[in-house]
Image (cartoon, rainbow, N blue to C red):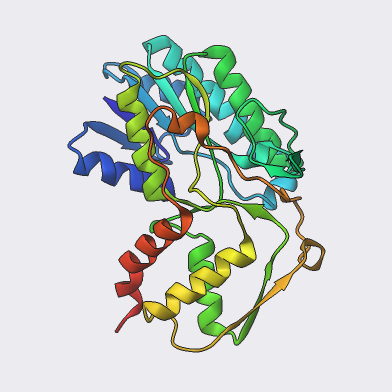
């Protein structure tokens, strides 16, 4: 049995749907069982035969975290520690979702150009959110070393607020929008990540090594590049009817309370060696937008 924690969030909902469509037995919880309440977690697993715990729950308000340090740490570090302790008691494998924000965002230069971050590159988060997620990773592995951590980036999907939906809203409301062009990373469709999680669960029965993995869609782009392609596809699928000019700006022109990584492209070579599929970002974005386009018609 698989237990999805944070099952009504963007990724948790996607994973629930994929497990259901593949006839994989699972149970799902969200805010009714808080990961900050160790006793509630322990009571929930009692008399249940749970083999995998997939933790999709997290505090993700990156800028608010700079002011809500204790709350962010309680959820992203203390909560993960509670899950780890419960998993150790029942002998379950934890699959925990982490983030590119554990890195500083400073480029590692090889052969004259930046290279994607590897799983064992030094971590150095610059935001409270990133620090709390890194602390959660450390606590999990210290309690249950036989765990799987999947770091991801720039998540978007059908079931929740994200960059794609925000862009569509702004592009429908305004004649011009400004998007940061000097922060680089890789978008990740929740559908692809959810499929990868299911593959990791299946692989754990034989050749999977526990530890840290990176997963995002393939490709290296800026937020501006992402917005331009969202606009192009939005026009193609008749989601956007009016012209909108997309203006590239620098990070300093769009100040935020939390510092964002300038470069946080993740290397997927380790997870690909297990046979996990990693689609190209443009292909996944097209599939996503074509699938939601009906919501904007009529």
Q: Nearer the viewer, residue 259 or 27?
A: 259
**Can you tell which quarter of the image residue 118 is in?**
top right
Q: Residue at x 37, y 31 (%)?
A: 275
Taking 72 as reference, is 170 above or below it? below
Q: Nearer the viewer, residue 63 or 101?
A: 101
Q: Residue at x 52, y 22 (%)?
A: 82
159 left or right, relative to 263: left
Taking 230 as reference, is 56 above or below it? above
Residue 206 rendering spot, x and y as whole percentages: 32, 16
**Can you tell which quarter of the image residue 1 is in?**
top left
Taking 190 as reference, is 130 above or below it? above
Residue 183 rendering spot, x and y as whole percentages: 70, 56
Q: Nearer the viewer, residue 24 or 281?
A: 281
Indicate the quadrant containing the C terminus: top left, top right, bottom left or bottom right: bottom left
Q: Nearer the viewer, residue 265 or 6?
A: 265
In this orientation, does residue 9 appear?
no
214 left or right, relative to 41: right
Q: Residue at x 32, y 34 (%)?
A: 198
In this orientation, does residue 175 appear?
yes
How many circles with numbers are drawn on the protein?
0
Q: Residue at x 63, y 83 (%)?
A: 176
Residue 236 rendering spot, x and y as whole percentages: 39, 78
Residue 235 rendering spot, x and y as whole percentages: 43, 80
Outermost left residue: 23
165 left or right, relative to 267: left
Outermost front residue: 111
């Amino acid at each position: 049995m698989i237990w999805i924690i944070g099952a009504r969030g963007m990724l948790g909902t996607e994973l629930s749907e994929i497990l259901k469509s593949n006839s994989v037995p699972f149970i799902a919880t969200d805010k009714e069982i808080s990961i900050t309440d160790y006793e509630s977690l322990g009571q929930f697993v009692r008399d249940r035969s749970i083999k995998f715990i997939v933790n999709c729950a997290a505090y993700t308000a990156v800028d608010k975290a700079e002011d809500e340090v204790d709350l962010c740490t309680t959820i992203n570090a203390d909560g993960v520690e509670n899950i780890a302790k419960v998993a150790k008691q029942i002998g379950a494998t934890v699959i925990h979702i982490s983030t590119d924000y554990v890195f500083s965002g400073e480029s590692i230069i090889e052969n004259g150009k930046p290279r994607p971050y590897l799983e064992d590159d030094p971590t150095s988060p610059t935001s409270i959110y990133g620090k709390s997620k890194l602390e959660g990773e450390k606590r999990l592995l210290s309690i249950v070393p036989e765990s799987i951590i999947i770091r991801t980036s720039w998540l978007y999907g059908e079931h929740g607020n994200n960059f794609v939906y925000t862009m569509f809203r702004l592009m429908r409301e305004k004649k011009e929008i400004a998007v940061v062009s000097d922060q680089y990373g890789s978008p990740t469709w929740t559908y692809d990540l959810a499929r990868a999680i299911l593959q990791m669960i299946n692989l754990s029965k034989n050749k999977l090594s526990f530890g840290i993995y990176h997963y995002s869609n393939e490709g290296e782009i800026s937020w501006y590049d992402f917005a331009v392609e969202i606009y192009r596809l939005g026009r193609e699928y008749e989601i956007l009817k009016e012209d909108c000019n997309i203006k590239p700006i620098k990070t300093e022109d769009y100040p935020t309370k939390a510092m964002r990584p300038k470069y946080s492209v993740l290397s997927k070579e380790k997870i690909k060696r297990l046979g996990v599929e990693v689609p190209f970002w443009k292909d996944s974005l097209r599939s996503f937008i074509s699938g939601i386009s009906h919501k904007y018609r009529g």
